[in-house]
């Protein structure tokens, strides 16, 4: 009885002294500590995985960087090869010939005289292949397979001119800056250079060299500038970071480009109204932007696409015209 009584007294003491509540709080804290230890182990495990992921990401980024470098190297090698080959066809020499010099070259070619079927002149418009000629069988018999293979595989936006002499002394291909219109196949004692020259100096060509933030509009006769207008506007550089900021940045950049296109279009409308009898319009630089610029502009000629970078050089403003109006010469 005494033991039971003492136990009851102890329990009453615990209740009134707060020891029971303290023990419960201790148990709660111990349980919380256990949960925190479990969370800590989870965090440590996650941290180890994160370190591995960061390390893997660094490895992937290094590999990606190396891959980009390799791509740049391959593109550079490909560009070098394109200067000496076209579609796997060997070309001995390729050069750009300006408008003034091409007149001299064609003049010299026209003075050559030989047998009645010695000289072959072949002019192929850009939308026509050599095999489309009604006289293709004759072309095959009078030339050689290697030359025809090259002629059929050269990519050109403006057509192709071939001068070929049967003894094998002259094998020359010219890609004109302005598209040739009429196909021609002539076998004679002389080369037929009529129709090979670009239009005379009195014809007007409108040039749209488009770049985001800086575009050049120019009116030229042959390779001589008549008037020009450089249109500049603020376009943000490309963003390199990820996340929402990049998406927002690119949207703002696109808005800047649209604004730039509208600004250039307005200048183009003014120049087109000031210029009488536009015979050609050449688009170069960023072709998609150039096409956007000319939308809705009343120009009664179809655009000529020239896939050249067309960077604007303030120190040499005539450099672009020299490239645009140059003939590309292939010596076989």
Image (cartoon, rainbow, N blue to C red):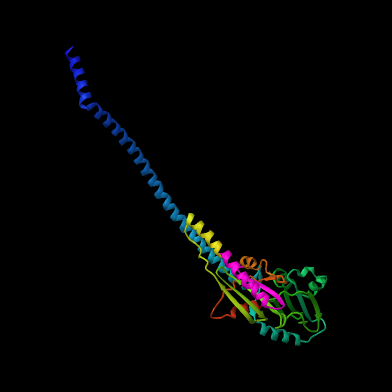
The quarter holding residue 163 reads bottom right
Residue depicted at 32% across the width and 35% down the height: 32
Image location (x, y in percent) of residue 173:
70, 77
Image location (x, y in percent) of residue 267:
62, 73
| Screen quadrant of the N terminus | top left
Confirm whether the magenta stretch covers residue 325. Answer: no
- Looking at the image, the residue that sits furthest to the top is 1
Residue depicted at 39% across the width and 50% down the height: 51
Of residue 322 and residue 69, the one placed in the foreground of this image is: 322
Confirm whether the magenta stretch covers residue 275. Answer: yes
The quarter holding residue 14 reads top left
Residue depicted at 54% across the width and 79% down the height: 314
* Any part of residue 135 in sight: yes
* Any part of residue 93 in sight: no
- 69 left or right of 146 in image: left
Image location (x, y in percent) of residue 80:
58, 71
Q: What is the magenta segment's predominant secondary structure? A: helix
| Screen quadrant of the C terminus | bottom right
Q: Which span is picked out in magenta?
A: 257-286
Of residue 68 and residue 210, the one placed in the foreground of this image is: 210
Q: How many marks?
A: 0
Image location (x, y in percent) of residue 304:
69, 71
Residue depicted at 74% across the width and 68% down the height: 127
The quarter holding residue 193 reads bottom right
């Amino acid at each position: 009885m005494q033991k039971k009584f003492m136990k009851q007294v102890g329990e009453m003491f615990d209740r009134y002294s707060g020891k029971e509540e303290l023990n419960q709080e201790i148990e709660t804290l111990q349980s919380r500590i256990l949960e925190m230890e479990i969370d800590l182990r989870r965090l440590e495990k996650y941290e180890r995985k994160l370190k591995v992921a960061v390390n893997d990401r660094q490895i992937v980024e290094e590999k990606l960087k190396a891959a980009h470098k390799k791509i740049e190297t391959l593109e550079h090698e490909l560009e070098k090869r394109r200067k000496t080959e076209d579609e796997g066809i060997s070309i001995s020499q390729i050069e750009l010939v300006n408008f003034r010099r091409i007149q001299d070259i064609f003049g010299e070619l026209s003075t050559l005289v030989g047998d009645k079927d010695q000289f072959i002149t072949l002019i192929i418009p850009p939308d026509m292949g050599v095999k489309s000629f009604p006289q293709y069988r004759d072309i095959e018999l009078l030339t050689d397979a290697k030359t025809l293979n090259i002629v059929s595989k050269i990519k050109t936006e403006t057509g192709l001119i071939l001068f070929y002499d049967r003894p094998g002394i002259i094998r020359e291909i010219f890609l004109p800056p302005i598209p040739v219109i009429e196909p021609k196949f002539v076998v004679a004692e002389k080369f037929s250079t009529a129709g090979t020259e670009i239009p005379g100096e009195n014809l007007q060509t409108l040039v749209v060299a488009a770049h985001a933030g800086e575009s050049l509009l120019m009116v030229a006769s042959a390779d001589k500038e008549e008037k020009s207008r450089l249109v500049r506007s603020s376009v943000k550089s490309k963003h390199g970071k990820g996340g929402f900021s990049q998406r927002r940045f690119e949207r703002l950049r696109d808005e800047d480009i649209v604004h730039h296109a509208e600004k250039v279009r307005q200048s183009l409308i003014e120049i087109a109204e000031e210029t009488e009898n536009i015979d050609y319009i050449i688009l170069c630089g960023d072709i998609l932007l150039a096409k956007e610029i000319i939308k809705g502009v009343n120009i009664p000629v179809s655009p000529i696409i020239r896939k050249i970078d067309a960077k604007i050089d303030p120190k040499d403003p005539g450099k672009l015209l020299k490239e645009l109006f140059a003939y590309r010469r292939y010596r076989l």
